[in-house]
Amino acid sequence: MLGGQGLLERYRAQIEQGLRTALAGEGALCRIGRYHIGLEDEQGAPSQAFGKFIRPALVLFTTEQLGGIANDALPAAIGLELIHSFSLIHDDIQDGDRTRRGRPAVWAIWGIAEAINAGDYLHSVALGTAAKGGLNSVQELSRATTAMIEGQSLDLSFEARFVDESDYLGMVDRKTGALFGCAFALGGIGAGLAAAVPTDVIAGLRELGREVGRAFQIQDDLLGIWGDGNALGKPIGSDIRQRKKSFPVAVAYARAQDEDRNRLESVYRADAVGQTDVNAIVDLMSCLGVREDVEAAVDRHSARALDLVQALPFPEDGRRELIALIETLARRDR
């Protein structure tokens, strides 16, 4: 497949089976977990409403590229996907999002209280699953989970203030970059490269994850304003309508003069944001050249990630495949 998608498809069946095993059982929280992952529909019938499984695939791919056996890293990969999944359940509650991948969010079906329980359950199962891969895997996953939760807290704090690029990237390095960095590092651990003190290779893998996380999230923010509404299932400017302090907003606020800043502040303080306001902010961003700066930022962090890939002790074919995937993630739907 083109664009690095073959890397993701190669491990899909292995990851699906690992998730089924981790979430086997008849309890209510097991069933909700299987629904959220996409293994079942709302009535419990088999389903395949999955995400891309990017993070667990990167764990298994990295393990193999460093000379290990993918199956040895599967417990850590499944643990990581379950951590990512638990965070999405809680994110949907905090953001008030009623849908996830075209289906009702967990809280929209089972209520907020039970959705919190389901998220906590996935977190617990994740750590127990990752423990089968050894103490180093659990420690790496725990460290990244802590950083991810801190990032979500920072993101919520942005609702009360406008932020600059430095603030934004500090949040993204935790909320998004930590789990990408964890995916690469878990791959290194799975290949037997980690000791009590992380090696230079593990440190480089974490740094790669940070840059991939930055490029991925900034591109996601770009799509939240200028993306194809039909392809994404949400209208152009949807992040403005939800008053998200995304990267384009940080760039616009830094560049705007007093009158335009006042306009931004007024819209983001409003109880509801209408289409007229959305159009006005999109027009303002166009006048300020924000989209061009956002695209340049994606390209800049992608380039840094590609440089880091070149420094990894991967076979050349593996480097090319990972580069293709990173370029696809950073330029999706542009």
Image (cartoon, rainbow, N blue to C red):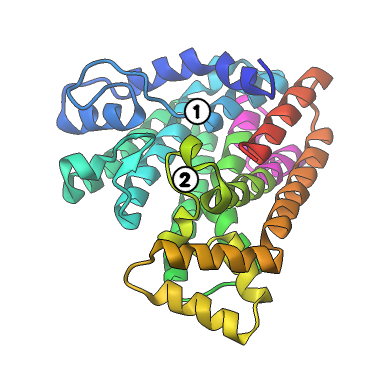
Which of 277 and 299 lies nearest the eye of the viewer?
277
Q: What element carries label 2?
A: helix
Q: Is mark 1 on a helix, strand or loop?
A: loop
Amino acid type, mark 1: Phe
Q: From the viewer's perspective, tell me whether residue 308 is left or right of residue 35.
A: right
User: Magenta part of the protein: which range?
Assistant: 185-209
Would residue 231 be visible to someone looking at this image?
yes
Quadrant location of the C terminus?
Answer: top right
Q: From the viewer's perspective, tell me whether residue 189 is left or right of residue 302.
A: left
Q: How far apart are marks 2 and 1 (CA)?
A: 19 Å
- Asked where in the image residue 6 lies, by quadrant, the reply is top right
Q: Main secondary structure of the magenta part?
A: helix
Which of 259 and 34 lies nearest the eye of the viewer?
259
Residue 89: percent from left, percent from top: 33, 44
Would residue 160 be visible to someone looking at this image?
no
- Asked where in the image residue 47 lies, by quadrant, the reply is top left
> Where is mark 1, residue-wise?
53
Residue 55: percent from left, percent from top: 54, 33
> Where is mark 2, residue-wise?
142
Residue most extreme to the bottom? 258
